[in-house]
Image (cartoon, grey):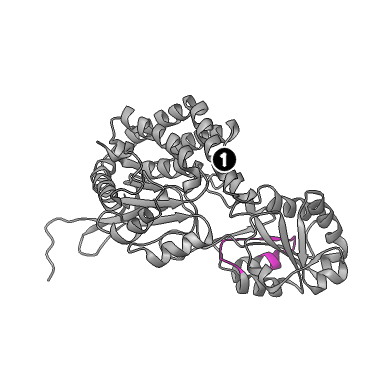
Amino acid sequence: MSTANAPAAGGEDIAGTMQALGREARAAAHALALASPERKNSALAAAAEAIEAAMPAILEANRRDLAAAGNRGLSAALLDRLRLDEQRVAAIVRGIGEIAALDDPVGSVLAEWTRPNGLRIQRVRVPLGVIGIIYESRPNVTADAGALCLKSGNAVILRGGSESFHSSRAIHACLVEGLARAGLPGTAIQMVPTTDREAVGYLLREMSQYVDVIVPRGGKSLIARVQADARVPVIGHLEGLCHVYVHASSDVSMARDVVLNAKMRRTGICGAAETLLIDRAALATHWPAIADALRGAGCELRGDAAMRDFDPHVLAASEADWSTEYLEAILSVRVVEGVDEAIAHINRYGSGHTESILAEDPAAVQRFFHDLDSAILLHNASTQFADGGEFGMGAEIGIATGRIHARGPVGAEQLTSYKYLVHGAGQTRP
C-alpha cells in the first residue's frame, strides 16, 4: 500500500512509517526529475481541478480543525492562519495555476562558456531531490509546497501541523489525484500520516539517506528546533521581525496608508510590520495621521520615551518589544534621528526578513538599501508584499533569511541546484 494514503501511525511504528515514506520519495524523485514540463503541468492542472471540485469537503475538514483548535485555545493569529473559506480555497487553485504557467526551471542553462582548450562548459538547473517540509497552521502550504516541488521536479514529504491535520489531508488527496491523472507517481507528494511529534524528530535526525533538504515554515520554536536537530541542510527563517521606517521626506498620506497596510492587512503573517521607526522631524507632520489610522483599526501602540513624550496615549515599550514578533494588532514605535539611527536599530534587533523605507529623498533610500542586508528591502511599499505570489513566483514555501543557497521568497527556482555539462572533442589533460 502506498504511504501516500496510509493510516495515521499514532503510537505505532514511527521508524517503519518514516522509512517507507523515504524509500518511496527517493524512487519518485528519480521519476519526477525525468518528467517533461508538459506532464508536470498536466498534474498541476488536474490537482487544481480536484481542489476546486473538492471545496465542500475541504471546508468541512477545515471546520473540524477550527473547532479542535478553538477548544485548545489557539491564538487569534493562529486561527486566522488555519482558517479556510471559499475565497482562500479559490486562491489556492489560482496559485497552482500560476505555478503551472511559470517557465520550467529544470534543464535551463544558467551559464555557458568555452575554455581555451576547446572544452564547452554549461551550468544547468537540476532538482534538489527529496525535500522535507515541516509547517504549522496554514493548510494552504500543503498546496503551495506540493505544487512548487512538483514544478521543480522534486519529491516532497510534507509534515503539517496537528492543528491543520484534516484540512491538509483533504488538500493532499487532491494533489495525489492530480499526479495519478498525469501518470506520475502519487508518492512524489507524500504527507506524514500521523500527528505524533516523534515523526518530526525522526524526519530531522534519521532520514539523511532519503531527504536532501529540510524547509521549515512556522514559529520561532519550530524553526529553532529544526535548525538544531536536522542532519541535512535547512532552508528557513527564524521569524519575521519586519520594520517600516518613516523618513521626514515621505509623503504624509502615503506613509499613513503604507504603515496601516504593513501592520494591519493581516497581522498573523511573517511579512507584517512589527516595529515602526519614525524620524523626529516627521513627528508633528506624520504621526497624527498614522496614529489615527492605526488606532482606528484597533492597533495597540507601544513606544519609547520620545514617542510617549510626543503622544502620551502611546503605551510604554519594554526592551523586549523591539525583538518581539507579535503576529497580532500590536506595533512598537521608536523615534530616530535620521536614516543612520534607523539602520542601527534594524541591524541590532531585526531578523533579516523584510524592511521598508518610506521616503522621497533618494540619498536616504540609497543609504537604506546599501547598508541593510535583510532578504527583502522595499521603498515606498508595504512589507506585506514579502510574498512569493506578489513576486511573480506563483507561490512560495517561505521566506528564507539565510545567506546560503536560497534567500527571500522560496519558489520553484529556489528549489533547484545545478550540475555542469562539459562537452569535449577528445581533449586530454597534460
Please give left or right for residue 246 compared with residue 406 in the image: right
Q: Quadrant of residue 4?
A: top left
Residues rendered magenta in the picture: 350-365
Amino acid bearing label 1: Leu
Q: Nearer the viewer, residue 307 or 340?
A: 307
Residue 422 magenta-highlighted: no
Viewer can see residue 237: no
**Horizontal side of residue 133 vs 381, given as left or right:** left
Find residue 354 and report its image quarter. Answer: bottom right
The picture places residue 51, in percent across and down from the top left corner, at 46, 30
Report helix, strand or loop for mark 1. helix
Please report the residue visible at 49 percent of the width from the left and 50 percent of the height from the top.
136
Q: Residue at x 38, y 65 (%)?
A: 229
Quadrant location, the C terminus: bottom left
Which quadrant holds the N terminus? Answer: top left
| Residue placed under numbered mark 1 in the picture | 66
What residue is rendered at 62% in x and 50% in y?
Answer: 77
Residue 429 seen in this snapshot: yes
